[in-house]
Image: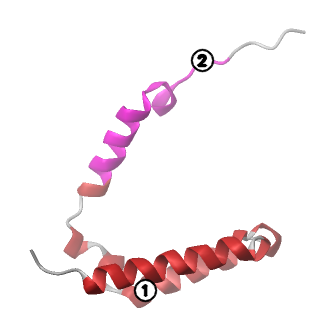
Amino acid sequence: MEKKEKSKRGLACLSPERRREIARMGGQSVPPEKRAFARDVALAAKAGSIGGAAAPAENRMFRKDKDLARRAAQASAEGRARKRNKKPE
């Protein structure tokens, strides 16, 4: 039996550029000062921890790939250092 090709519907039928545009509008709908995680780093860390714990241990990416975890931590530290050392314009 031949498999029928499914037609794309919803966001899948849009171009990648249009999908990005729509996603950007959603992100801009709430001002930064009203975003809970932007104001409360501890809350963001707790949420990330809960989300990470919800995934089965065998599916946790950093547990599988220690080099990936090391590179992510290094990139994060470098980003923080750049932000800290950025001179006002």
Q: Which residues are magenta?
A: 6-26
Side of 84 relative to 31 (left or right) = right
Q: Quadrant of residue 43?
A: bottom left
- The mark that comes first in sequence, 1 or 2, is 2
Q: Which mark is residue 7?
A: 2
Helix, strand or loop under label 2: loop
Magenta stretch contains residue 8? yes
- In the picture of the structure, the residue carrying the numbered disc 1 is 43
Towards the viewer: 38 or 73: 73
Q: Nearer the viewer, residue 34 or 58?
A: 58
- Does the residue at mark 1 contact the one at mark 2 (Cβ under 8 Å)? no
- Where is 53 relative to 8, above or below? below
Above or below for 12 versus 46? above
**Left or right placement of residue 33 versus residue 70 in this view:** left
Along the line of sight, which residue is nearer the eye, 49 or 87? 87
Residue 52, image x and y in percent? 64, 76
Q: Residues within 10 Å of mark 2 (few under 14, many from 20)?
A: few
Q: Residue at x 60, y 80 (%)?
A: 50
Using the image, tell me which numbered label, if any, was put on residue 28.
Answer: none
